[in-house]
């Protein structure tokens, strides 16, 4: 996983609430293995028309926002399906940070596995950032994970928190499976106790 | 000395913590894992990373997302990339000795129908699957939630997951459901009440007389859509209904194991006085058959209602959201819901494709004719067989329904089962998102009986009003 330390880049405001992962990437693309072509699948059906041409009314197609690496969204971004493909599409496109008042729980977890940073800020803060970005198209936001602060287009510094475990994982670009395998003794010990407590869970031979 | 009263969720959570990772993250042990064909690439990624599967015996797999429902089971997938999702699933599970109920096996079906049906889902366990509707399994009083591809790799390699402990929410549905009000209506009303983000960060326990009175099929419908309320998991305390369902199922414990398991399971229900972070209460008596009109499951109203008027909303963000939804859905404000014509009907999905769902739809359909294309897609081969043994397939076919093979089908359309752009679908599935049932398709969510009523009238219909009509 690509480590995340800090990003300073153009930010794009997405005003709609409840942007679901079906909207981020439609289901018909999900059989494709993860790869760079996921960049072209991001927001596919709102980004492109029937003939594959960019829709001018989609904000990320507008010249000022084409280099966006940060999204400022509204409530419940990434709700719905568990598809990690939604984060793969964001990452392939170049999005490193999504700032929103709340996220779908599974999407939120998936972000950390891929190296995209989800930042939770109060609803009014997110709304104010989106207003600034609409007023100054192409303005940048700086997000620093080390100090857990973001700097809005108006220069205001806004603190945020990421839980220490995930923050360390992102800063180091950690291989979480390797980290967990380091706890093998504890896992094996747990399994022995658990098997004593609930012996009926053992499935030795499948029906 | 008496311990502090604990919730059902707290009891299961604390029993599965292997170690703490600092900052509130726990390494949670995962008892069981369900897999479907949509997750087939995970095997390749795992192999490429040089990892092995820690406990293949804790896994059961099926094919549901990509299987065709049109013809006989198996085969018949024209697109090689899609066909590969199913054939590769058979190959990988065969090599890894993971039990696989694939096309041609009567046990094949939607993963959230198959797991409970096989008794693989048990009270008290932790269970995950790479699918957000894994919440379904919580109907058995276990902690079951959906995970992404990387988390799936992690569980395969370690039998564990790093998780932050969610908060506990209890939703009580008190009293008795009125006639004509289905489990689907209960959960749609719950989501409308707490919003699509209302359960974010929470595990929901459904309680109260109306939940306790539900069958397992009904409890699964309710828990299934917990994710549509933002919660990764929904649960119902195990009781006599749960045990009666599970006893004798292939993976369920038997003999002395069954007695020991049952004794433990009986300790699981939330203790008297257990404290929840959030409490919500609904009166079952106030519920009515419910349909969605918008593109989020929270946009649900009683069938007696009208399409909302954005002009009546003071909040500009909400007004814009309603306007966008009305435009996508092709609806005019203030239209009575029963005046909305539908082009197609889909009865199926992990929400509503079990035997009782098909029975309730068939009861409406019997002796009537559909006026729009209408499908029934049973949740599994076993559900399909059981329905056929009762003659339900004949009722559906005689009414003009297509009686199809099991799979996720038109709930998500990954196998090509989609509507056409602009088509309006009365659907028993779980998501009415833009494009969910095909590009430009407009979805109205409802119960199987309500979908059946829409199929025979060609419009959204109050199934209670249809009851008195001649067949």
Image (tube, coloured by chain):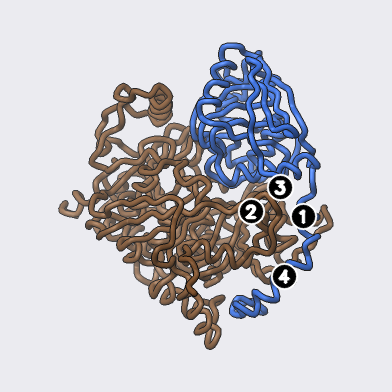
Q: Which residue is mark 1?
A: A177
Compared with B168, A64 (above or below) is above
Return the residue nearer the eye: B184 or B360: B184
Q: Disc 1: which chain?
A: A
Q: Single out the mark in the foreground, 1 or 4.
A: 1
B163 to B356, vertically: above or below: above
Q: Colour of chain B?
A: brown
Residue plotted at (54% across, 21% down): A128
Q: Please tell me if label 2 and label 4 are on a single chain.
A: yes
Circle 2 sits in a helix, a strand or a loop, which is it? Answer: strand
Looking at the picture, how far across and down is residue A76, in whole percent? 52, 37
- Circle 2 sits on which residue? B163
**Chain ID, mark 3:** A
Are labels 3 and 4 assigned to the same chain? Answer: no
Q: Is residue B333 left or right of B468 when viewed as pictured?
A: right
Task: For mark 4, give the secondary structure.
Answer: loop
In the rendered image, which quarter contains the N terminus of chain A? top right
Marker disc for residue A165? 3
Q: Chain of mark 2?
A: B
Q: Residue furthest front?
A: B1
Q: Chain of mark 4?
A: B
Locate residue B374, reporting x and y percent: 38, 49
Q: Say if residue B104 shows up in the picture.
A: no
| Residue pointed to by mark 4 | B97
Q: Are marks 2 and 4 in contact (CB under 8 Å)?
A: no
Colour displayed for chain A in the image of the structure: blue
Give the residue displayed 42% in from the left and 27% down from the top: B321
Q: CA distance from mark 1 to mark 2?
A: 14 Å
Check whether the beta carbons of the residues at disc 3 and disc 4 lie within 8 A of each other: no
Alpha carbon distance from label 1 to label 4: 22 Å
């Amino acid at each position: 996983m690509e480590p995340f330390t800090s990003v300073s880049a153009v930010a794009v405001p997405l005003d709609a609430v409840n942007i679901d992962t079906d909207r981020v990437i439609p289901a018909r693309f999900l059989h494709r293995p993860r790869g760079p072509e996921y960049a072209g699948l991001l927001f596919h059906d709102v980004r492109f028309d029937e003939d594959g041409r960019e829709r001018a009314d989609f904000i990320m197609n507008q010249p000022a926002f084409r280099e966006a690496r940060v999204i400022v969204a509204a409530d419940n971004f990434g709700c719905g399906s568990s598809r990690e493909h939604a984060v793969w599409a964001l990452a392939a496109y170049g999005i490193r940070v999504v700032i929103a008042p709340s996220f779908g729980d599974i999407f939120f977890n998936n972000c950390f596995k891929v190296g995209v940073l989800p930042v939770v800020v109060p609803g009014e803060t997110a709304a104010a950032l989106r207003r600034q970005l609409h007023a100054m198209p192409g303005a940048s936001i700086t997000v620093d994970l080390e100090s857990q602060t973001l700097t809005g287009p108006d220069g205001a510094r806004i603190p945020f928190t990421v839980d220490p475990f995930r923050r360390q994982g992102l800063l180091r670009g950690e291989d979480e499976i390797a980290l967990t395998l380091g706890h093998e003794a504890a896992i094996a010990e747990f399994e022995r106790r658990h098997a004593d407590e609930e012996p009926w869970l053992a499935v030795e031979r499948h029906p | 000395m008496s311990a502090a009263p604990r919730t059902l969720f707290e009891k299961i959570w604390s029993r599965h913590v292997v170690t703490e990772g600092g900052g509130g993250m726990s390494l949670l042990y995962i008892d069981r894992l369900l897999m479907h064909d949509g997750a087939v690439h995970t095997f390749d990624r795992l192999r490429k990373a040089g990892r092995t599967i820690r406990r293949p015996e804790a896994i059961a797999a099926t094919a549901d997302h990509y299987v065709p429902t049109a013809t006989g089971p198996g085969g018949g997938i024209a697109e090689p990339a899609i066909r590969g999702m199913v054939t590769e699933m058979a190959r990988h599970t065969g090599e890894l000795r993971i039990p696989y109920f694939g096309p041609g096996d009567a046990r094949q079906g939607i993963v959230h129908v198959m797991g409970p049906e096989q008794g693989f889902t048990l009270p008290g366990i932790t269970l995950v699957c790479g699918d957000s509707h894994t919440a379904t399994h919580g109907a058995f009083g276990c902690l079951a939630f959906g995970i992404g591809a990387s988390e799936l790799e992690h569980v395969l390699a370690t039998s564990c997951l790093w998780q932050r402990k969610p908060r506990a929410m209890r939703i009580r549905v008190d009293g008795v459901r009125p006639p004509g009000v289905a489990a689907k209506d209960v959960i749609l009303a719950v989501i409308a009440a707490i919003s699509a983000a209302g359960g974010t960060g929470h595990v929901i326990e459904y309680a109260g007389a109306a939940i306790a009175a539900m069958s397992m099929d009904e409890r699964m419908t309710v828990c299934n859509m917990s994710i549509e309320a933002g919660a990764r998991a929904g649960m119902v305390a195990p009781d006599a209904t749960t045990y009666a369902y599970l006893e004798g199922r292939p993976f369920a414990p038997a003999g002395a194991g069954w007695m020991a398991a049952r004794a433990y399971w009986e300790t699981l229900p939330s203790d008297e006085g257990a404290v929840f972070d959030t409490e919500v209460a609904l009166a079952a008596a106030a519920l009515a058959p419910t349909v969605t009109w918008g593109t989020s499951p929270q946009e649900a109203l009683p069938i007696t209602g009208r399409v909302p008027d954005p002009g009546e909303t003071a909040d500009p963000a909400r007004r814009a959201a309603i306007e966008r939804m009305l435009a996508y859905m092709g609806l005019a404000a203030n239209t009575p819901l029963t005046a909305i014509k539908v082009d197609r009907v889909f009865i199926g999905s992990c929400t509503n494709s079990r035997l009782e769902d098909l029975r309730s739809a068939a009861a409406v359909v019997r002796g009537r004719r559909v006026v729009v294309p209408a499908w029934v897609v049973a949740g599994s081969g076993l559900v399909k067989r059981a329905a056929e043994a009762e003659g339900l397939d004949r009722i559906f076919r005689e009414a003009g329904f297509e009686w199809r093979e099991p799979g996720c089908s038109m709930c998500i359309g990954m196998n090509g089962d989609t509507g056409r752009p602009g088509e309006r679908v009365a659907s028993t599935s779980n998501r009415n998102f833009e494009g969910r049932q095909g590009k430009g398709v407009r979805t109205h969510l409802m119960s199987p009986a309500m979908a059946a009523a829409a199929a025979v009238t060609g419009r959204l219909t109050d199934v209670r009003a249809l009851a008195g009509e001649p067949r």
